[in-house]
Image (cartoon, helix red, strand yellow):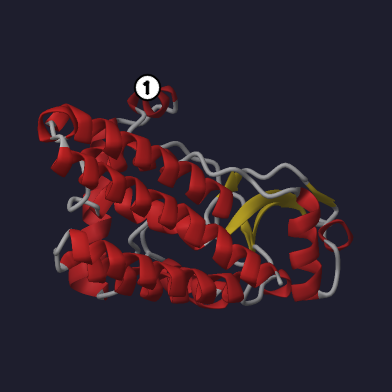
């Protein structure tokens, strides 16, 4: 039942946007001097971009990920869309703790608070498919616990079907080949991002590749509390490389950090041939 409801909600979001453009196009043809101006179309684009943003936030899951991709790669869309969807890069609303606790217990057989000495109910960060909580084990070590949301595989399957339909409809109005690549890239990305066991293996392999570099560190995976839908790692504090003041406060030269990041990328690409795209 929830799958059918989700399908209806997603169809309603895209259907509303589609009808809005249909009406706008009809009026523009009937009264071009009033409704066919650039200013008028900018208002239509902005209004529908906000509809898409709000709809994606309500739907979450694949739609958050799609919004993130479009905010970066959606050059075939009006600028209003990339501007509105940029908020999905960092401002993803979190799921309530009971939802995360249920997913954790289903995966590992224990509730988070039974598995760890302490487990913060408020997440450190929320993303499109899961969220991260801070915890401590019996030894007092700080941990970062990443948990995928419940039924994420079924949600992805349904969402990709709706998106495929929506993109085919959109292509009739905007005949741009790249639009099909969005769907293909999203499907491939989601297949990898919903396998946290694979992420744990990649993390371990990446750490081994930089074992001799004292300035490049990686979290340590705790396999006893990790599986395909849960990943438990050692907690690591940090700041964004773009925040120069924060780096200076830590006694780090921003230019030295940028140089190091470039060297790390080059090693991954040209020596290890194993690349981490989201450090």
Q: Is residue 160 visible?
A: yes
Dot 1 alpha-carbon crowd within 10 angstroms: few under 14, some 14 to 19, many 20 or more:
few
Which residue is disc 1 drawn over? 245
Between 204 and 113, the one lying in front of the other is 113
Q: Residue at x 36, y 51 (%)?
A: 19
Relative image position of residue 180 (x, y in whole percent): 24, 71
Locate residue 241 relative to residue 105 in the image: left or right: left
Q: Residue furthest left?
A: 33
Residue drawn at (10%, 29%) of the image: 33
Quadrant holding the C terminus? bottom left
Query: How far across and down, in percent of the image, does residue 88 sit?
Result: 44, 44
State whether residue 219 appears in this view. Answer: no
Q: Nearer the viewer, residue 139 or 185?
A: 185
Q: What residue lies at 85% left-to-right and 63% top-to-bottom?
A: 111
Q: As displayed, is residue 182 above or below residue 124? A: below
Secondary-structure class at tag 1:
helix
Question: Please, is residue 155 above or below residue 124 in the view?
Answer: below
Instruction: Please state, as top left, top right, bottom left or bottom right, where the N terminus lies in the image.
Output: bottom right
User: Does residue 24 appear left or right of residue 186 in this picture?
Assistant: left
Outermost residue on the right side: it is: 114
On screen, residue 89 versus residue 120, left or right, reads left
| Vertical position of residue 101 compared to residue 25: above or below | below
In percent of width and height, residue 4 lies at 63, 71
Q: Measuring 33% from the left and 55% from the top, which residue is drawn there?
A: 69
Q: Quadrant of residue 131?
A: bottom right
**In the rendered image of this protein, does residue 254 appear above or below residue 264?**
above
């Amino acid at each position: 039942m929830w799958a059918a409801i989700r399908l209806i909600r997603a169809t309603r979001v895209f259907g509303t946007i589609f009808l809005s453009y249909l009406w706008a196009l009809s009026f523009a043809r009937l009264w071009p001097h009033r409704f066919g101006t650039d200013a008028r179309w900018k208002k239509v684009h902005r209004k529908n971009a906000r509809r898409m943003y709000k709809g994606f936030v309500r739907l979450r899951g694949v739609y958050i990920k799609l919004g993130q991709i479009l905010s970066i790669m959606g050059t075939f869309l009006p600028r209003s869309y990339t501007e509105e969807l940029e908020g999905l890069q960092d401002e993803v609303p979190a799921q309530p703790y009971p939802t995360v606790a249920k997913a954790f217990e289903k995966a590992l057989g224990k509730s988070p608070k039974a598995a760890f000495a302490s487990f913060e109910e408020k997440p450190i960060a929320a993303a499109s498919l899961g969220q991260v909580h801070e915890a401590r084990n019996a030894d007092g070590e700080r941990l970062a616990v990443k948990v995928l949301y419940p039924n994420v595989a079924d949600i992805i399957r349904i969402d990709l079907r709706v998106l495929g339909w929506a993109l085919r409809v959109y292509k009739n109005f905007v005949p741009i080949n790249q639009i099909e690549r969005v769907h293909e890239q999203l499907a491939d990305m989601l297949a990898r991002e919903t396998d946290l066991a694979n992420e744990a293996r990649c993390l371990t392999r990446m750490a081994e590749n930089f074992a001799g570099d004292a300035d490049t560190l990686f979290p340590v995976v705790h396999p006893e509390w990790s599986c395909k839908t849960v990943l438990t790692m050692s907690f690591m504090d940090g700041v964004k490389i773009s925040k120069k003041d924060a780096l200076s406060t830590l006694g780090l030269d921003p230019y030295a950090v940028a140089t190091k990041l470039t060297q790390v990328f080059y090693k991954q690409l040209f020596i290890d041939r194993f690349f981490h795209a989201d450090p």
